[in-house]
Amino acid sequence: MKKTYFILITLFFFVLIWEHDNQGVAYNPLFHVEGGDNNSMSMPCGLGGSHKHNHK
Amino acid sequence: MSELNIQKLKVDKPVLIYGIIFSILFSYILFNSVGNRHLYVFFIGLGLGISLYQAAFGFTGGWRNFIEKRDSKSLRAQIIMLALAVVVFSIFINSKSFIYDGTMIGAIAPVGTSVVIGSFIFGLAMQLGGGCGSGTLFTAGSGNLKMVITLIFFIIGSLIGSYHFEFWTNLPSMGGFSLLNSFSKIQTILIQLSLLTLIYIFISRLDFNRNNKIMHSDIVSNSSHNFMRGPWPLLWGAISLVFFSFLMLQAAGHPWSVTFAFGLWGAKIASAIGIDVASWFYWQLEYPSTALENSVLADPTTVSNIGIILGALIGSALSGKISNFSSVNKKLILAAVIGGLFMGYGARLAFGCNIGALFGGIASGSLHGWVWFLFAFLGSVVGVKFRKYFY
């Protein structure tokens, strides 16, 4: 059980690192625009800033 | 666990070294090729993982204890945690971060059909899966193989939820409502603290009526008070989670979130095997589309989740309990599969889990956090009944 567990999470960690190496990343792409106001913000829920939450 | 038994447990050095090596590796990668703020988020994740593990701070068991035995201990600790978070977050949301040049925002989502149904499904499923969003992460990180299965199906469920996202969010909704946008900070704090106080009194009364006694000090007792070895009193867990959540708000610019990353991991895997996830409505929204186009390590939710897994691993190594691998039978696997799948699906519909929607939502003064709390609890009442067929 312990071996299976560590094989699984080690595999998971290396896949993350491998994907990072292949995909690449722009600096801070998912953080809010620095110095911006609320309209430039987004949340992980996917709906954007609070003004965009009133879509329905 | 008694003080004597804790002293007998030895630190699991190989596991501790494993956790430290991977923590250093991820810190190096984040510092070199992503950014300082991601590194801070990772460290905060480590702190959250250690805190969650050492205090065994989960929503699932606490809610179940109250539903089955009217044991309100864990639920009272959660109410105190929410009260602390309400005060801290109400003061700082919509103000400038001290870590970066920008304004911090709250977790505000629409109150609608999708939240009601999604949170009910989540509450039901978490009783089958054996952990909520944060609970699944920290127990999977601390060596629980069954929770690794729950996590795998949590990811699949999140992906399916993102596929159906457009349908659910087009159902009737009253839109987002934030107390902070309608009242002053002081008024928001007073309104929410009043509600939390009423809930605290109500659950304490129910506990007393059933068990004929209640000890309000039990959330600081019955533990070892050993900082390194644990288990911590629940109050320590509540305070440390609010502290690290505050740091997360300052570093990430938004409240702590867990389940977005699960959907992202699923979408990445689906894309890798040729499924055109990018054409789905959800993955064309601003934040998800950016996340999908970049490395997973660019997503702060992923970074904090890795930190939580490694933090829980380090915590369990320090306490010497990582080797307590429980056996997994077919019934438990089935519960983990069903629970994980529906938790993932429910979290996507409800704009998050107990952390992103309940904790983050209520701390941000958003009505959807309260709706999530109510319907997830009702779902748990049903889930506890179903759980008996599996456990």
Image (cartoon, coloured by chain):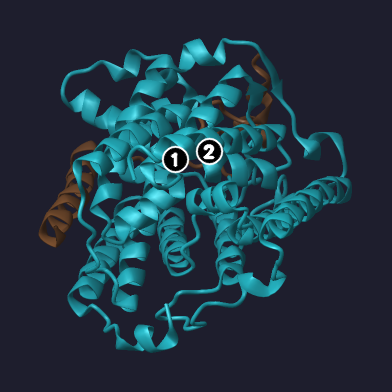
The residue shown at (87%, 39%) is: B183
Between the C-alphas of marks 2 and 1, the distance is 7 Å
Disc 1 is attached to a residue of which chain?
Answer: B
Residue B97, horizontal then vertical, whole percent = 64, 54
Tell me the cyan chain: B
Point out the image quarter for the C terminus of chain B: top left
Residue B275, picture quadrant = top left
Classify mark 2: helix, strand or loop. Answer: helix
Q: Amino acid at mark 1?
A: Met
The vertical placement of B172 against B379, above or below, is above
- From the image, tell me which residue sits under label 1: B126
- From the image, tell me which residue sits under label 2: B380
The residue shown at (15%, 49%) is: A11
Residue A9 makes an appearance in the image: yes
Q: Chain A colour?
A: brown
Residue B8, horizontal then vertical, whole percent = 30, 87
Residue B127, picture quadrant = top left
Classify mark 1: helix, strand or loop. Answer: helix
Q: Answer left or right for B41 relative to A24.
A: right
The 10 Å Cα crowd at callout 2, few under 14, some 14 to 19, many 20 or more, is: many
Q: How many marks?
A: 2
Do callouts 2 and 1 point to residues on the same chain?
A: yes
Q: Answer left or right for B138 relative to B210.
A: left
- Viewer-proximal residue, B301 or B37? B301
Point out the image quarter for the N terminus of chain B: bottom left
- Viewer-proximal residue, B310 or A22? B310
Disc 2 is attached to a residue of which chain?
Answer: B
Q: Answer left or right for B319 relative to B361.
A: left
Q: Marks 1 and 2: in contact by CB < 8 Å?
A: yes
Residue B287, horizontal then vertical, whole percent = 47, 30
